[in-house]
């Protein structure tokens, strides 16, 4: 542990609306990893969405409303951790900016932001996690999601965590830091550009032909998996937490459900 | 057709244009690799960016004082300084200088400001011949196009396109001549343009920087065309804007150390020229008069807005070279003078949010532009700023209603949870065992080109609740 | 009048009441220009500096000819031109140092004097400084070295004394100003390699408008060989 907590810190899991709706297994994987890292995991009922879609659409008022609700939902916890670079950046960097001009709220947002972390960087930088439950054997590649990479500097940590699994083979694709073209509402506002971007991404992936594409953001993953699926590719996509936690019972994103 | 619809049509055309896609595959990537090499070779690169940002910020924060200093020193070096509040005024000033000089032929070196004020058309309307001398600008002038990149205006053309154009336009030359390589084409352009240089009465350049301390303009080119433009004709016009100032020569070097490295990936541009006034009595070359036109065209308004940082821009083009949207669609699809991230921020300021606000929408906010910008302009925040203005002014009731309804829902965790539960169940059921939806009700903008991954079927909140109930409080 | 309109708009944007303070801050900065941090490549000394300059010239494709003394320059130029099959004829300005060279040592070399003419093949100038950081030559306009000589001819030959190689652009400009009696010449031309363009299909081609070929004659005069 590098954060100096003697007792088990209470970590509020910010599930993110995509994980809640689309892929609960990522939430369970995150909870498992946090538990491994010696944390008590709490999932506040009152959380919904961080407000990023409103914020990035220019609707500051709505974003602020949701931001205040989110801050309130995580009152009293030692940390707030999200399995998403994009949501974590919203909570950590943009909430205080959103409140600027309103001293009281800004103070609250700053206090909140200090406790917020993206999952993978939290595990490595704050909790110094030294081993992971998962033991994936096979060839994977990792896509650097933009917000995590550029806003929160998440890049070494996921690779460090993956390297804890002896039988995994991480092969870097070309242009791993290039945007996949998701961009939230961008993907449906400008589908053609988005498609051109994700096509470039799947072309990079094809060059290294992994079994799995991993990333720390479900938005990117849905976009990449959706494109790979349309291209008839067999390559799977998973949130990196699933692999690290060994929570891989569910099929990869956009893959057929196992016959039950 | 709305602006957004027109933009989308341009985008589709660009994506379907194979020649363009070919051109875009190589050139920006070459610039990106070049910049990366330069950055790796200069350990102080990131520190220099901070210095550069501070220099620009200091200048902007004292802009009135430096403008006056510049004017005083430029005048004492023998230049005439003109002020133009609008594009109209700037054109008028250029026209009257050219008229007074009896100009028939005007040589121009690359200037984005002249694009901004649509200068060439105004000069041509007065029966003056304008010749663009930067090779890329010359090519697009022949084709009647607009620059598709601020430092590589003809980046959308391939060598073969240029050969075709030359055969068509240089019709005084043997039609069966060999134009197989860029080398022969450059030689041909050089000899055609050399004639024009020698005939030109007026030379117009832009300026990369203006130096308040000395009243100088700093102009960089790789071709040397600006130097011929400012040395051979009897009149030199520097057409530039009020944001181009730096306080002293000492302040220019950190910016110049970054400019070429960020732009083309060179350590320094071939020709960096500090020009101060017209020829001196003892000189045997150079123009008899030198005019500096300081154009505002919306900059002073930006200065007092949240968008002030955009005025730091040194027009290196790195943001567009590194922009995945620009690299997918090229410059013309933006249908604005300045394309790419800088264009998406600057154009709404120059043309109004109603005209160009949609450009700020066409970004994933991936942030690569601000990561490379040599003067650390927070381009993403600026784009978001325009989205906020557009949202406030918008009559797009559909997205407003949608956003507001969704926020109402998200404000109510119970209702939200219920809605999520229903959505997850329905989508999952629709997908069946396939794990995907090939078509999504209301979502064909996604599913036209991608499958939609099916949700696992139950929400996390529900499952977690169940787990807490079954196992007691979570581990 | 536009001048006042623009200035008052700028002043308004910046808070008009502080205009006097801004004016004095600006004059102070101009009176004593800031010393910004320079990268290491712009701080090299001695042999390292000379070596960097040479490396940069090589990387830029600039020909470099070393001579031990100024006397050797005319013959070196003649040898250089004939080795490349170029006409043995050049044009130079009235620069004192260039004028004092023993041109009769290269008797088959024709030397014209004055600003460049359209059909000159070779221009000769003297650079007042060389900045090692990027292999950049600093030239000043004037009758000594008419600026057209640097741009019109196909081949540009530049004479540079080794002592004039400095570390940085800052130092190069200081040298130019010192040689020019403290007066800023009409143009200071910083030349880093020959003219080039990448505008046709992204391929770099030399000799876009200015010279295709750049050669530096480096006079070691008095410098110790290492
Ligand atoms: S915004 Fe920055 S990166 Fe883009 S052109 Fe301007 S200075 Fe260059």
Image (cartoon, coloured by chain):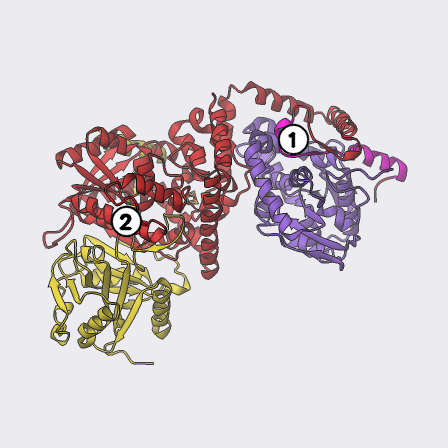
Check disc 1: other Cα within 10 Å, few if <14, some if 14-19, many if 20+: many
Magenta highlight on residue B78 = no
Distance from disc 1 to disc 2, alpha carbons, whole Å, reads 50 Å
Q: Determine the residue located farthest toward the left in the rendered image.
A: B281
Circle 2 marks a residue in which chain? B
Is residue B467 rendered magenta in the image? yes
The x, y position of residue A219, in whole percent, is 65, 38
Which color is chain B depicted in? red
Q: Which of the two marks, 1 or 2, is nearer to us in this view? A: 2
Which chain is disc 1 placed on? B
Name the disc covering residue B188, or none. 2
Residues drawn in magenta: B443-472
**What residue is shown with label 1?**
B447
Residue B88 marker: none
Q: Position of residue C200 (x, y in %)?
A: 37, 48
Q: Position of residue A40 (x, y in %)?
A: 79, 45
Q: Pick the quarter of the image with the C terminus of chain C.
A: bottom left
Residue A232 x %, y %: 69, 40
Q: Secondary structure at mark 2?
A: helix
From the image, state the color of chain A: purple
Q: Quadrant of residue B68?
A: top left
Of marks 1 and 2, which one's residue comes earlier in the chain? 2
Contact check, label 1 and label 2, Cβ < 8 Å:
no
Q: Could you tell whether A28 is left or right of C60 in the image?
A: right
Visible residue check, residue A6: yes
């Amino acid at each position: 542990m590098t954060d100096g907590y003697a007792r088990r810190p209470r970590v509020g899991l910010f599930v993110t609306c995509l994980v809640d709706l689309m892929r609960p297994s990522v939430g369970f994987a995150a909870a498992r990893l946090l538990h491994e890292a010696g944390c008590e995991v709490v999932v506040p009922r009152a959380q919904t969405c961080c407000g990023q879609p409103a914020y990035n659409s220019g609707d500051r008022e709505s974003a602020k409303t949701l931001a205040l609700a989110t801050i309130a939902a995580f009152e009293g916890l030692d940390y707030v951790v999200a399995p998403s670079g994009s949501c974590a950046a919203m909570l950590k960097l943009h909430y205080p900016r959103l409140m600027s001009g309103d001293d009281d709220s800004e103070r609250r947002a700053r206090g909140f932001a200090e406790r917020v972390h993206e999952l993978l960087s939290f595990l490595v930088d704050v909790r110094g996690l030294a081993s992971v439950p998962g033991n994936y054997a096979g060839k994977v590649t990792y896509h650097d999601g933009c917000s995590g990479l550029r806003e929160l500097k998440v890049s070494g940590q996921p690779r460090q965590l993956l390297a804890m699994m002896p039988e995994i083979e991480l092969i870097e694709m070309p242009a791993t830091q290039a945007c996949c073209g998701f961009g939230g509402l961008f993907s449906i506002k400008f589908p053609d550009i988005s498609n051109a971007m994700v096509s470039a991404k799947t072309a990079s992936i094809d060059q290294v032909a992994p079994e799995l594409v991993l990333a720390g953001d479900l938005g990117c993953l849905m976009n990449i998996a959706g494109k790979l699926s349309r291209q008839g590719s067999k390559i799977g996509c998973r949130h990196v937490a699933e692999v690290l936690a060994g929570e891989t019972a569910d099929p990869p994103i956009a893959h057929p459900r196992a016959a039950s | 057709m709305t602006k957004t619809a027109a933009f989308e049509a341009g985008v589709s055309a660009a994506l379907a244009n194979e020649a363009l896609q070919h051109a875009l595959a190589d050139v920006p990537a070459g610039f990106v690799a070049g910049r990366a090499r330069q950055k790796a070779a200069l350990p102080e690169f990131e520190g220099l960016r901070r210095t550069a940002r501070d220099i620009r910020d200091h200048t902007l924060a004292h802009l009135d004082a430096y403008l006056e200093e510049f004017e005083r020193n430029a005048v004492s070096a023998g230049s005439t300084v003109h002020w133009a509040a609008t594009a109209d005024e700037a054109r008028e000033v250029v026209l009257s200088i050219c008229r007074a000089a009896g100009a028939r032929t005007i040589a121009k070196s690359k200037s984005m400001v002249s694009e901004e004020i649509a200068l060439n058309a105004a000069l041509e309307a007065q029966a003056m011949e304008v010749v663009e001398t930067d090779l890329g600008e010359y090519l697009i002038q022949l084709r009647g196009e607009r620059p598709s990149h601020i430092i590589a205006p003809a980046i959308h053309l391939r060598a073969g396109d240029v050969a075709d154009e030359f055969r068509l336009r240089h019709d005084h030359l043997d039609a069966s001549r060999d134009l197989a390589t860029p080398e022969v084409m450059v030689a041909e352009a050089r000899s055609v343009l050399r004639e024009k240089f020698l005939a030109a009465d007026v030379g117009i350049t832009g300026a990369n920087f203006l130096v308040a301390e000395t009243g100088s303009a700093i102009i960089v080119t790789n071709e040397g065309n600006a130097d011929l433009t400012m040395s051979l004709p009897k009149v030199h016009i520097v057409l530039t804007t009020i944001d181009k100032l730096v306080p002293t020569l000492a302040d220019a070097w950190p910016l110049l150390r970054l400019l070429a490295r960020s732009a083309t990936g060179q350590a320094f541009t071939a020709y960096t020229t500090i020009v101060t006034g017209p020829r001196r009595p003892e000189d045997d070359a150079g123009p008899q008069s030198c005019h500096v036109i300081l154009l505002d065209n919306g900059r002073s308004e930006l200065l007092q807005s949240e968008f002030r940082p955009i005025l730091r821009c040194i027009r290196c083009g790195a943001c567009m070279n590194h922009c995945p949207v620009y690299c997918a669609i090229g410059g013309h699809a933006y249908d604005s003078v300045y394309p790419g991230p800088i264009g998406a921020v600057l154009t709404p300021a120059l043309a109004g949010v109603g005209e160009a606000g949609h450009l700020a929408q066409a970004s994933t906010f991936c942030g690569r532009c601000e990561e490379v910008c040599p003067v650390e302009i927070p381009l993403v925040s600026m784009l978001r700023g325009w989205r906020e203005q557009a949202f406030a002014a918008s009559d797009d009731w559909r997205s407003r209603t949608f956003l507001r309804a969704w926020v109402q829902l998200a404000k109510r965790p119970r209702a939200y949870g219920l809605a999520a539960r229903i959505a997850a169940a329905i989508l999952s059921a629709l997908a069946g065992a396939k794990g995907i939806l090939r078509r999504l009700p209301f979502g064909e903008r996604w599913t036209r080109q991608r499958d939609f991954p099916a949700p696992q079927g139950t929400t996390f909140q529900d499952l977690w609740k169940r787990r807490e109930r079954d196992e007691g409080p979570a581990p | 009048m536009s001048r006042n309109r623009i200035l008052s708009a700028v002043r308004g944007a910046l808070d008009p009441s502080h205009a006097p303070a801004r004016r004095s801050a600006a004059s102070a900065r101009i009176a004593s220009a800031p010393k910004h941090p320079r990268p290491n490549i712009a701080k090299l000394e001695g042999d390292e500096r000379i070596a960097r300059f040479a490396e940069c010239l090589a990387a830029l494709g600039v020909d470099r000819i070393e001579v031990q003394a100024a006397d050797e320059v005319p013959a070196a130029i003649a040898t250089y031109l004939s080795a490349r099959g170029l006409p043995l004829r050049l044009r130079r300005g009235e620069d004192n140092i260039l004028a004092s060279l023993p041109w009769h040592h290269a008797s088959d070399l024709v030397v014209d004097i004055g600003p460049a003419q359209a059909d000159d093949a070779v221009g000769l100038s003297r650079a007042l400084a060389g900045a090692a950081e990027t292999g950049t030559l600093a030239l000043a306009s004037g009758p000594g070295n008419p600026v057209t000589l640097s741009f019109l001819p196909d081949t540009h030959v530049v004479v540079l004394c080794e002592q004039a190689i400095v570390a940085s652009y800052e130092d190069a400009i200081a040298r130019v100003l010192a040689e020019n009696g403290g007066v800023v010449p009409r143009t200071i031309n910083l030349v880093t390699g020959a003219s080039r363009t990448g505008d046709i299909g992204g391929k770099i081609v030399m000799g876009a408008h200015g010279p295709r070929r750049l050669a530096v004659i480096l006079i070691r005069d008095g410098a110790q060989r290492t």
